[in-house]
Amino acid sequence: MLHEYVPEVSDDELSIWQGESGAPSAIVYDGEVLAAPNLTAAEAPGPRMVAIPGDGLGQDEAGRRSPEFRPDRVTTLEQDVDYSVAFAPSVMPHKRVSALDRVVLAPDGVPVLAAPTRPPETLSVASAPGVGRDRFWGSVTLDFRSGVRVPIPSVSPESQILSVQTEPRVPVVFERDEAGNYFVRVAPGAPGVVRLAFLTDAPVGYFNQSLPDASLPVGARAAEVPPLPSSVRENALLFAAELGLSPRSSYRHALETLVHHFRSFREAREAFGDGQDIYLDLARGMLGVCRHRAYAFTITALALGIPTHFVMNEAHAWVEVRLPAGEWMRIDLGGAAAGVRTQGNTDAPHYEPRMADPLPRPPAYRASLERAAQTTGSGGASAAEGGEGSADQPGAGSSSSSVTTSASGGQDGSGAGGVTSDGSATATSGSGSGGSAPRPREGVQVRLSAASSEVLRGRALDLEGQVTNAAGAPVASMRVEVLLAGRGERLLGVAVTDARGRFFGAFGVPHDLAVGDYRLVVRTPGDAQHLPGALP
């Protein structure tokens, strides 16, 4: 007989209830009740979102949306940056303000990232969040004195608006463009300054999700990529080939390779490249903070046929990629700031992704996460927690990262490899920073020698196995993650291989896991010398 654990009440059951006005009055996140923003209280410190006549776009500064991003060569860290918290739970430092999805050539020939050209579409207020979506309160002050359309921050490019309140009360219309930039529009003659509180959501898979099957091509959604200038596309494919990639690569292999390469950047004041093409100089030189990494990643991914957004706010820049099945996923490329000053709702709990980061985490990236945790006092969350760290200033030169940890290792600037459909891994060497090519990482195999076929919730799943390299030699000190996959993934625990490459343990199965069949996932994220690997 199957038994179902029924708690007194769950977060989902408490997640929304109605106030006297009929609008939601609170949500629950991780057991904590988050009340709707109070629009009659004193305005929180921080920049207002500012309207610009015509299109609502502004400059690269707090409170404005950027119509474009032009790269620079300032590749050192900023000591302190400001960040305005707009959501509860907080997604710091990944509040979406500007999302760019096109590449154009500036008059001087520099590739510049630009916003969509089509007018935004009107959004309806949804009646309720869908399945597999988490909710967030948003609170911002909108300044309409220069125009009737104002940009607003968002959590994801596929967020819904679930409820709206304004002070003073005024009818508003929500809009969204092709890159997932959000706007609020009012009728002419509306008050110049309006405070807005809104309930929004985001798909849980946006923050982290399983990577697609290795057989899917990198260009599965290439028809959705805006055309690149021919010279930019030629240079991007030339660089991709240096990483062992082409439009014929598998999507998973290409994504793992690109993430490993761009997460391996360093922040330093050094001369790099020949000064002829800043994209190639950044991509090959592997120097720069978040905006440099996200810029070069975006151009390379678009050339390969991956729909990609370059996203930034006043304190950070990162990328979003569209997976073959159509979902968008956020990818932080790392680099740690020396300090972040927060404004707004600084007491908001921090949102933690439900799944661990599935992408490579090279040593340079892990080091930046540790530095971010130290400077912000966030405490360095584990990969299982999916925590996030500090931020970076797109206009001044620092960077941020989502805090996920992995096994330790030395410096590694190589391109990453991919995991094949049989669970083994393949290695591809990448281009370094102008010197000799780094050593390619070695593939690994993950095998189980013993495992339970079924287990009761609240009990332990006993596992034994081994991690070996391609030659069959054991791999020691390798992180091994154990998960159950069904409707999403649930991390059960982490083991580390011993000197004989063996791992074993009793991994507790949560008592609130739904009854059913699950696929056992056992994988390693790899390290400086080894590629990721998983069970066949």
Image (cartoon, rainbow, N blue to C red):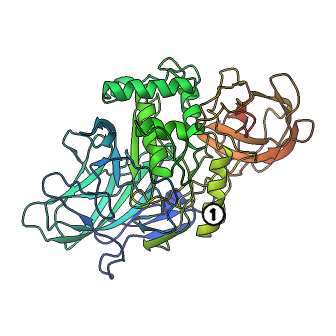
Q: Position of residue 378 (x, y in %)?
A: 61, 66
Q: Is residue 324 above or below residue 350?
A: above
Dividing the picture into quadrants, the one containing residue 228 is top left
Left/right placement of residue 230 relative to residue 35 reads: left
Write the residue at 54% across / 68% down. Answer: 339
Dividing the picture into quadrants, the one containing residue 96 is bottom left
SS for callout 1: helix
Which residue is under mark 1? 373
Left/right placement of residue 81 relative to residue 46 reads: right
Q: Is residue 446 above or below residue 116?
A: above
| Amino acid found under the numbered disc labelled 1 | Ala
Left/right placement of residue 18 relative to residue 536 reads: left
- Any part of residue 460 in sight: no
Q: Position of residue 482 (x, y in %)?
A: 74, 41
- Any part of residue 192 in sight: yes
Q: What is the quadrant of the N terminus in the image?
A: top right
Q: Position of residue 106 (x, y in %)?
A: 26, 40
Q: What is the quadrant of the C terminus in the image?
A: top right
Write the residue at 37% across / 49% down. Answer: 159
Q: Nearer the viewer, residue 154 or 354?
A: 154
Q: Around disc 1, counting alpha carbons within 10 Å, would you say few (fewer than 14), some (14 to 19), or many (20 or more)?
A: many
